[in-house]
Each structure stands twice: as C-alpha cells, then as structure tokens.
Amino acid sequence: MDKLKTYGIVQGRGKHYEEALYSLALLYNICNTKMSAYLKKHNLTVGKFNILVAIKTHGGEEGISQVEISKHLIVTPSNMTKLIDKLEKDKLVTRSALEGDRRVNIIKVTATAANMLDKMWDEYSKELEGLMGKLSKKDQEIISSNLVKWLSAILEE
C-alpha cells in the first residue's frame, strides 16, 4: 500500500472521496496506457478505435452522423473531425454528405475496418478482462454496479 502514497492516495483519513477519485484517475491512466499499447499493434489509437466501434455499433450499414458519434464518446468536435480525417486517410471510414442536408456528414466503417474489428474483438475483450482479472468476479460486479450507479447519479444532475 506504500505505492499508493506515491500517487497521493492515503487511506485511513476518512477522505473516501479522495481515495476513490485519485484511484479512479490512476486506474484510468494505467488502463489507457495498456490498451493503447495493445491497439498500437493494430495501428490504432484509443480514440480511433472508440470511433470505429461507435460507428459500427450505433451506425450499422447506414452509417451515423459525426454529431451522433460524439454523443457516444467523450471527444470534442475538433478532435472528432481530426480523428475521422485520419481514419478516412487510412481507408477505415467513408464520409458523405447526408442527402438533403449537406451540412451533415454520414460516417460509415469500410469493410476493411469491420473485418479488423471482428478479428481483434476477442483479443481486445481478453485484454479488458485481464485488467480486471486481479479482482474476484464478485468484486468486479460490485465495482461495476457502484460505478454505474455513481455515473447515473451524476448524469441526472
């Protein structure tokens, strides 16, 4: 537990809000670093991967607007445009104007991207599972339930 103090996490002072938030921030950084390393093997960043998954999941074959993609992710509009530009250059997405409203771009994953996501999904899931693997299934359920409850309460404000 001395390692936790290195990161400013001091237990036993009754400041559970600090322990939780600092731990959550540190866990995010650790998980992001590990998942970034995994995705790099596929020439993807976390941002590009999340956009591809959002398009494939929420857009299907019809595609999805950039605005709708941003509703599913935590990405600023300018970053969204830059990432989609890169994905388009990599031939992983196509972008076209919505019929009847040229201000709206419809984004679709290409067959190449869809195949890549399908091939890597099981391994990606195992990577995620491995990050949680230090905890029992019961602890994973408790953490998941509490984080979702907390997030829901904050989003309702």
Image (cartoon, rainbow, N blue to C red):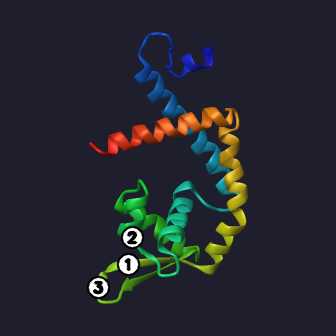
Q: Amino acid at mark 2?
A: Gln
Disc 1 designates what residue? Answer: 105
Task: Specify whether 23 is left or right of 69.
Answer: right
Task: Specify whether 105 is left or right of 43.
Answer: left
Q: Quadrant of residue 133?
A: top right
Q: Which mark is residue 129?
A: none
| Residue 53 position (above or below residue 125) | below
Name the image quarter holding the C terminus.
top left
Measure the C-alpha gap from mark 1 to mark 3. Answer: 9 Å
Q: Secondary structure at mark 3?
A: strand
Q: Which mark is residue 66?
A: 2
Q: Residue 125 location, x and y as percent?
A: 67, 53
| Residue 153 position (above or below residue 5) | below
Name the residue: 70% across, 33% down.
134
Q: Residue 14 location, x and y as percent?
A: 42, 12
Q: Amino acid at mark 1?
A: Asn
Measure the C-alpha gap from mark 2 to mark 1. Answer: 6 Å
Measure the C-alpha gap from mark 3 to mark 2. Answer: 13 Å
Task: Specify whether 86 is left or right of 113.
Answer: left
Badge 1 local density, few (<14 within 10 Å), some, or many (20+)? some
Name the residue: 54% across, 71% down.
56
Q: Earlier in the sequence, mark 3 or mark 2?
A: 2
Q: Residue 104 location, x and y as percent?
A: 33, 78
